Amino acid sequence: MNRSRRTPTTALLAALLLTSLATGAGPARADAPAAAAPTAGPESAPPAADPAVHGALVEALRQAQVDSPNAPVRHICYATHVANIGWQEPVCDGKPNGTEGQSLAIQAIDIIATNTGGICADANVQNIGWQGWRCGEDGTDILVGTTGQSLQMEALAVSIATNGICADAYVQNHGWLGFQCAAAKQVAVAGTTSQGLRMEAVEIVV
């Protein structure tokens, strides 16, 4: 994956969140297709997380905390399940996960965070639509999407209890769409809906 794309800094995140408070979204590209947020509904029961992926996420989160030991810094780590490849190594805090330019769909995402007050996620999946919210406390990973069904994820919705969250998606035929941000208890949506376009990579930052 091309990792030369700049990872959001704290200052950039603050600017994105201020934009989201004013307009309801972060600075997406002007030509980027829109994604509709999931409608309100009950949280759904999460599928069982892969133990190896869970362990890797916990270790990635621990390392992120070690790398910033002087404050209770917020972190978010995530791993994607990619068609024909399987689970990718976890990354944290705005780094891209998935692939670019290989025409390979993300099928699932496993997410873990700390100092957020809890996180919720929902996935818009080919032939299914929005699955339903799946939520977890800090330090508990949540899995959205599917594995073993060859179904592409087309959008990701995320929400946290405190402060804000931003997400961006690399989408078939469009590339990176631009960060979408949401304040606490609001919803940020990355990707597209009703267009049949696969997500190929994702970035999330809190």
Image (spheres, rainbow, N blue to C red):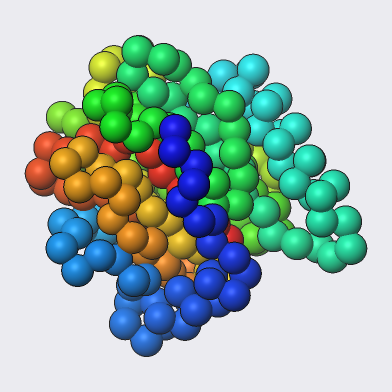
Against 15, residue 10 (above or below) is: above
Against 7, residue 13 (above or below) is: below
Residue at horizontal 54 percent and vertical 46 percent from the top: 95
141 to the left or right of 35:
right
User: Which residue is situated farthest in the front direction here?
Assistant: 4
- Residue 108 pos. (x, y %): 40, 30
- Residue 203 pos. (x, y %): 46, 48
* Front in this rendered view, residue 48 or 77: 77
Q: How many marks?
A: 0
Q: Where on the picture, by quarter, is residue 27?
A: bottom left
Residue at horizontal 65 percent and vertical 33 percent from the top: 57
Against 204, residue 132 (above or below) is: above
19 to the left or right of 37:
right
Q: Would residue 100 be seen by someone viewing this image from the given angle?
A: yes
Residue at horizontal 88 percent and vertical 56 percent from the top: 69
Q: Quadrant of the C terminus?
A: bottom right
Q: Where on the picture, by quarter, is residue 173?
A: top left
Q: Quadrant of the N terminus?
A: top left
* Front in this rendered view, residue 12 or 78: 12
User: Which residue is situated farthest in the left direction here?
Assistant: 195
